[in-house]
Image (spheres, coloured by chain):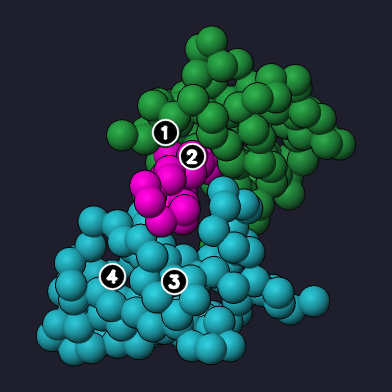
Chain colours: A cyan, B green
């Protein structure tokens, strides 16, 4: 049973560039959430996708956007990168829209220089 | 607004000692869930437990146990006979319902870093 997978593992970008991170949910899951985790902090919710729509959004600017595909996989896009966007980006999947446990992937470590 | 406080930033214990990680939460919901996650050095968050606010009985799973006290808004986590493999950052989390959409986001505490020394 495949768990949540994310790619790439690590990424180094320059300020002003754009980046796309990818996530495949755990088998059988249809909901994908994205979180940003700065060093030494807890994960912060970015947004959640269900049925290919953004269902909920945290306190992040429009530079952060996403997409969910018919196979439930998801992308996180960040435009006009800032130094402060350097973080671990975590994808979590769950089944449906209830307060069910979310299963996390290994994350993508983004460094903006 | 939902809020989770983990006042202990770092804890160090010697192997085989018992250790308790504290979690205090704030919510206006009358019914809610609480979660604990473990984040080892590899970075991946590992789900440990989900509890419903209806159920205040202590939960035990092997060396892990959880004490949920609604009266004090606490959901503490105890590791008995700690092992080196328990070294990780532990997060307490509270789902918040996005009104009208039926979807939940997790609000995390800042985490407690546990170091178990051999």
Q: In this rendering, which labeled residue sits more in front, label 2 or label 4?
A: 2
Name the residue tied to disc 4: A86
- Give the left or right position of residue A81, taking residue A70 as reference: left
Name the residue tied to disc 1: B4
- Residue at mark 3 to residue at mark 4: CA–CA distance: 23 Å
- Residue at mark 2 to residue at mark 1: CA–CA distance: 7 Å
- Chain at tag 4: A
Q: Residue reaching furthest front? A: B100
Q: Quadrant of the C terminus of chain B?
A: top right
On residue B94, the disc is: 2
**Residue A22 appears in the figure:** yes
- Residue at mark 2 to residue at mark 4: CA–CA distance: 25 Å
- Dot 3 or dot 4, earlier in sequence: 3
Is A96 one of the magenta-colored residues?
no
- Toward the viewer: A107 or A78? A78
The image quadrant that residue A30 belongs to is bottom right
- Residue at mark 2 to residue at mark 3: CA–CA distance: 19 Å
């Amino acid at each position: 049973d495949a768990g949540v997978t994310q790619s790439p593992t690590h990424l180094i970008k320059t300020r002003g560039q754009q980046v796309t991170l990818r996530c495949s949910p755990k088998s059988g899951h249809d909901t994908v959430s994205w979180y940003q985790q700065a060093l030494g902090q807890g994960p912060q919710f970015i947004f959640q996708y269900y049925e290919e729509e953004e269902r909920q959004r945290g306190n992040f600017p429009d530079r952060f956007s996403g997409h969910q595909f018919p196979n439930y996989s998801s992308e996180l896009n960040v435009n006009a990168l800032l130094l402060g966007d350097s973080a671990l980006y975590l994808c979590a999947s769950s089944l449906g829209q209830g307060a069910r446990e979310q299963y996390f992937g290994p994350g993508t470590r983004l460094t903006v220089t | 607004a939902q809020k989770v406080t983990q006042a202990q930033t770092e804890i160090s214990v010697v192997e085989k000692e018992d250790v308790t990680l504290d979690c205090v939460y704030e919510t206006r919901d009358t019914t809610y869930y609480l979660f604990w996650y473990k984040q080892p050095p590899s970075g991946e968050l590992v789900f440990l437990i989900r509890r419903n606010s209806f159920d205040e009985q202590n939960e035990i799973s092997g060396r892990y146990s959880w004490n949920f006290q609604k009266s004090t808004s606490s959901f503490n986590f105890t590791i008995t006979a700690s092992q080196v493999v328990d070294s990780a950052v532990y997060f307490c989390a509270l789902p918040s319902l996005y009104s009208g959409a039926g979807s939940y986001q997790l609000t995390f505490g800042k985490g407690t870093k546990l170091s178990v020394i051999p």
